[in-house]
Amino acid sequence: MDTTTLPEWSIQQVAKMAGTTSRTLRHYDDVGILTPSRIGHNGYRYYDERALRRLQRILLLRDLGLGLPQIADALAGRDPEGNAHAGSPTAAESHALRSHLTWLREEQNRLARQIASVQHTIDALEGGEKLMADKMFDGFDHTQYKDEVEQRWGERAYADSDAWWRAKSPAEQKAWQQDVAQLSADWVRAAESGAAADSDVAQALAQRHVEWLRSVPGTPAANPGGDVKAYVLGLADMYVADERFGANYATADGGSAGAEFVREALQVYAAAHL
């Protein structure tokens, strides 16, 4: 037995350990952020410890809400403006981990507040006590994406979309949410049917999706001078990279196939029409 052989894992093993799919790992290779350590004579992809560490960092950055282009910059040691980071790669990785830890602690705090809020409601209902309205919604922050939107597209983008939403009546808000939910359900149904990304049904959904994005003031899709194609492609990547958004397109097996289907269909649509 050759004890000098470095350990490695197949693409299926890595996908299972990381909670992702082989398709996603192949996409990461296609966009240049995660290359297999070797490809066997049978065409199978294998990953060594160095590749696993890189994948871990990709997943951490993804959970922070970064799109694939921003992840590529971070892995290459560049800041959002394309400038090289000062310090060693180790320092850059440490910074990413610390940022991720901060985000996890914020989420932990928010969830703890939600748990306490719901427990208060349960206790009041079961004990016949009076509900304290100021405690019922602690931790339920409906502007939780405010900072993220402002960072990505500017303060004006959030202000315009927020004003547009608040101007709607409760009935209008409910109707809009139902339309969005229906679009998501139609995406999932098409994905589960096995439709191809370039099929008529997928491209009709992609057109509806882009029209929906154009309907929200403040987004690059609604801005006459905005780069609609880049915006749509960026969101398409985010649906797969960020489970918060990908959950809207989760198929019955709970995997990311639905989000991947949406991404591919939007990529086809963008190439042809945007």
Image (spheres, rainbow, N blue to C red):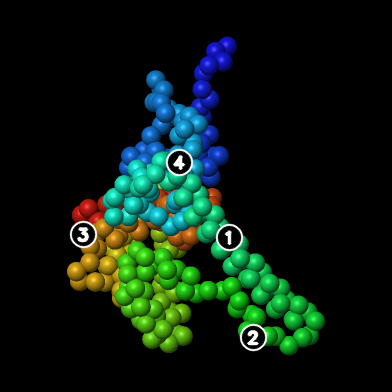
Give how far apart the Cα atoms at labels 4 and 1 are. 22 Å
Mark 4 against mark 1, which lies toward the viewer?
Answer: 4
For residue 133, which numbered disc appears in the image?
2
The residue that disc 4 covers is 90
The residue that disc 3 covers is 274
For residue 105, which numbered disc appears in the image?
1
Q: Secondary structure at mark 3?
A: loop
- Quarter occupied by residue 229: bottom left
Mark 3 against mark 1, which lies toward the viewer?
Answer: 1
Mark 2 or mark 4: whose residue is earlier in sequence: 4
Q: Secondary structure at mark 2?
A: helix
Give how far apart the Cα atoms at labels 3 and 1 are. 40 Å
Residue kind at label 3, given as amino acid type:
Leu
Q: Residue at x 56, y 58 (%)?
A: 104
Mark 4 or mark 3: whose residue is earlier in sequence: 4
Image quadrant for the C terminus?
Answer: bottom left
Residue kind at label 4, given as amino acid type:
Thr
